[in-house]
């Protein structure tokens, strides 16, 4: 009984510190306005394209698809492969990413007949399972789609998030994706808006301060 009380107390303290960290990051960086997309489908394509590249490169690919009037499920489905490859070239690894996009589109039309609302309205566990069954879509991409396209309270764990939490002593080095996600989601409110902003703020922190070689002086979390 006493051990359980200690565990509960530690979780409350950690929750308070994580929310304090969020407040400090938000005060420093301000709202990040993620995901920068006009439609839910654009979020899905952006989540696939953003693997292993900077968002600025993804934005160029997205604009290319818009210029072709192809940023819809039907538009991508009917776009010849050479034109798709050329459009997404700025995002890097474009052959691999084109295959992943086509894998998604194939499954999407076979199972959901192009009905995006029905697809995104699936129960969260079911939707995540379907996404992970698509070749080339991993947990981070699937959870980005769940959070930013489907509006589900699922926290996206990326390398920046893990780096920050490991350096602050919350997570162990080498922790797996699912374990890190469960740890975090047990300790903060399950809130879509919070998860949306917190993930983006972790990315900003990782890009500007918590780099491979950390720049701790001036870091918004320096006081912690």
Image (cartoon, rainbow, N blue to C red):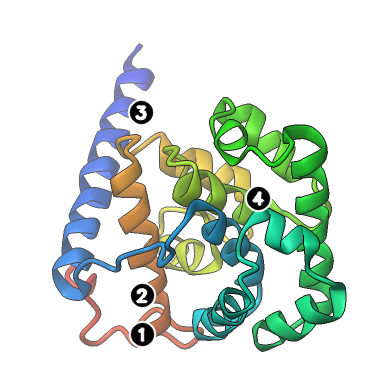
The residue that label 2 is drawn on is: 204
The residue that label 4 is drawn on is: 139
Proximity of marks 2 and 4: CB atoms separated by less than 8 Å = no
* Left or right, 61 with reference to 150: right
| First along the sequence among labels 2 and 4 | 4
Between circles 3 and 1, the one closer to the viewer is: 1
* Left or right, 51 with reference to 62: right
- Based on the displayed image, in which of its 4 quarters is residue 127 positioned? top right
Alpha-carbon distance for marks 4 and 1?
Answer: 25 Å
Task: Name the one closer to the observer, 153 or 109.
Answer: 109
For image coordinates 30% across by 65% down, the residue present is 33
For image coordinates 43% across by 44% down, the residue present is 184
Q: Can you give x and y, in whole percent of width and height, for residue 11 in the image?
A: 32, 35
Proximity of marks 3 and 1: CB atoms separated by less than 8 Å = no
Proximity of marks 2 and 1: CB atoms separated by less than 8 Å = yes
| First along the sequence among labels 3 and 4 | 3
Alpha-carbon distance for marks 3 and 4?
Answer: 28 Å
Residue 175 visible somewhere in the drawing? no
The residue that label 3 is drawn on is: 7
């Amino acid at each position: 009984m006493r051990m359980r009380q200690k565990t509960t107390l530690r979780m409350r303290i950690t929750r308070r510190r994580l929310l304090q960290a969020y407040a400090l990051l938000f005060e420093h960086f301000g709202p990040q306005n993620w995901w920068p997309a006009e439609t839910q489908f654009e979020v899905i394509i952006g989540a696939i394209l953003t693997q292993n590249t900077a968002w600025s490169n993804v934005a160029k690919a997205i604009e290319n698809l818009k210029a072709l009037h192809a940023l819809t499920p039907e538009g991508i489905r009917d776009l010849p492969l050479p034109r798709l490859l050329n459009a997404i070239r700025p995002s890097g690894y474009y052959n691999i990413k084109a295959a992943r996009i086509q894998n998604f589109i194939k499954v999407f039309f076979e199972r959901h007949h192009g009905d995006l609302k029905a697809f995104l309205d699936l129960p969260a566990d079911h939707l995540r399972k379907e996404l992970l069954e698509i070749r080339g879509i991993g947990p981070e991409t699937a959870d980005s789609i769940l959070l930013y396209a489907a509006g589900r309270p699922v926290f996206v764990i990326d390398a920046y998030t893990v780096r920050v939490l490991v350096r602050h002593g919350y997570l162990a080095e080498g922790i797996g994706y699912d374990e890190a996600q469960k740890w975090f989601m047990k300790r903060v409110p399950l809130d879509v808006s919070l998860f949306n902003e917190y993930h983006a703020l972790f990315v900003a922190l990782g890009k500007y301060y918590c780099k491979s070689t950390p720049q701790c002086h001036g870091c918004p979390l320096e006081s912690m």
